[in-house]
Image: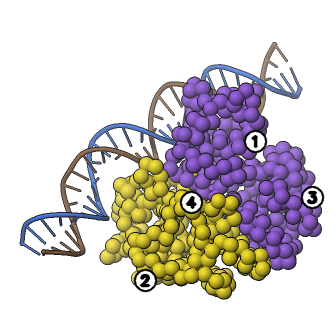
Chain colours: A purple, B yellow, C brown, D blue
Amino acid sequence: MDSMIRQFYEIPGKVVALKAGEYLFREGDHAKYFYFVRSGQIFITKFAESGRVLSLRLATRGSIIGELPLYEENPVYIFNALAQSPSEVYAIEFPTLHSYLEKKPSLAINLLKIIGMHMRKQHSKFRDLVLYGKKGAIYSTLIRFANSYGREVDGGILITVPLTNQELANYSATARESLNRMLGDLRRQNVIDIRDGLIFIRDINFLKREIQCEDCGREICNIE
Amino acid sequence: MDSMIRQFYEIPGKVVALKAGEYLFREGDHAKYFYFVRSGQIFITKFAESGRVLSLRLATRGSIIGELPLYEENPVYIFNALAQSPSEVYAIEFPTLHSYLEKKPSLAINLLKIIGMHMRKQHSKFRDLVLYGKKGAIYSTLIRFANSYGREVDGGILITVPLTNQELANYSATARESLNRMLGDLRRQNVIDIRDGLIFIRDINFLKREIQCEDCGREICNIE
DNA sequence: TTGTTACTGTGATTATTATCACTTACACCC
DNA sequence: GGGTGTAAGTGATAATAATCACAGTAACAA
């Protein structure tokens, strides 16, 4: 993945630093830049009128952000990008990226590969949610976080990102209370555990089995 | 859209004719070709272990198909492609497409545009389903079919594709009975009507209002 | 120490959606 | 014109998930 990103560094752009809790952009903003993340973590979310928040990704080093309106006549961001921790992103203006994509086919092809991967992530998430309901959404979110931010310890996987129940619920489009109950069940079944506020997955295969995981690999099944 | 597709005709490939009910490929098949549709209509679906079917698109003239595994090391189709009516597709081998993409940046850029559009479709569908439940899924499906296959008549929109309740339910990941009840309600509210087995939408704005449609335009909000 | 705040955990209730078990309607074919 | 098959429609019930209304907890500041 990093090898695909390296090319983008050669394109003129600027580095933007974000504090935790700071927005890089909000949905509806005029879109001027394509970004990729150099360091830190960035929530990609969408708001509903009702006040609910839908979380889609937690972008990290190497992730691209804000690519969707790249070729639109009146480009507007459709998501919010909010720094979860202090972060640095590299910002490339759309017209600059356009001209580099035209000049360097290998760059366009790399972007195609990256976007194709995003497409597959999105599809697999859709499938999990749609076919296995909230359980599918939640288990799938846990697996994705484990793949992106998990560290193997004590025969299990510790998700190294601190997430509140509400934040996790936003990723699975679930009510906080429902998520809480499901986590409670998983805890009682010894599938997961909470360690200093972080989720520790004892038995990730249980989660995979329950949602008939197609084992699409870490390149696809992640939250980045 | 058609202008973006025209370029692909210049790439060597072959025409494949399909009868109604014939599969172009199935999920799990080794993926060798990238396709685009010349004529007819092709269902893009995915099976669940449980026997349920999830319908994703109804591809038509100008749609691309089977592009997802384009850059994979061991390419496998992840969906089924089933001709709904007699159809013709143009098939380009992946390696051939690769070399043309490398040679012609404008082709790669066009593919980027198309895939970016697919991404947005997918996101908006996800949003509808996740934020407004089955009602969101069903209303959104009706709007998409209206945008892709609707003909304006008598101050309303006639969806010119014959769809059974089961097929519509597959698009919205709903039980047939649930879909049937919802359509019944819409009929009673004079929002839709059935004309010779086709759905006639009297008041599409009702559907749009109910799911807080973001009016993303026909380029995005379709089923192709 | 005591508020304050944000988060977690839970019971009770309601709303939504699926499932099961049918009946009805309609097209098509000998 | 009766028989067959497929799809539509519907009631009853069960399963799933959201909502409301709190009680408990932990961290932190004054």
Q: Position of residue A76 (x, y in %)?
A: 74, 68
Binning the other alpha carbons within 10 Å of mark 3 as few (below 14), some (14 to 19) or many (20 upward) gives: some
Contact between labelled residues 2 and 1, with CB atoms less than 8 Å apart: no
Q: Which quadrant is the C terminus of chain B positioned in?
A: bottom right
Residue B137 as seen in the image, left or right of residue A171: left
Looking at the picture, do discs 4 and 2 lie on one chain? yes
Q: In the rendered view, would you say B50 is above or below C10? A: below
Q: Mark 3 or mark 4, which is nearer to you?
A: 4
User: What residue is pinned by disc 4?
Assistant: B78
User: What residue is pinned by disc 2?
Assistant: B153
Residue A11 as seen in the image, left or right of residue B104: right
Binning the other alpha carbons within 10 Å of mark 2 as few (below 14), some (14 to 19) or many (20 upward) gives: few
Q: In the rendered view, would you say A197 is above or below C18? A: above
Q: Which mark is residue A15?
A: 3
Instruction: Give how far apart the Cα atoms at labels 1 and 2 are.
Output: 54 Å
Looking at the picture, do discs 3 and 4 lie on one chain? no
**Residue situated in front as seen by the camera: B24 or B156:** B24
Task: Identify which amino acid the numbered label 4 is placed on.
Answer: Ile
Mark 4 falls on what kind of element?
Answer: loop
Q: In the rendered view, would you say A187 is above or below A50? A: above
Binning the other alpha carbons within 10 Å of mark 1 as few (below 14), some (14 to 19) or many (20 upward) gives: some
Task: Identify which amino acid the numbered label 3 is placed on.
Answer: Val
**Residue situated in front as seen by the camera: A195 or B147:** A195
Q: Position of residue A123 (x, y in %)?
A: 60, 57
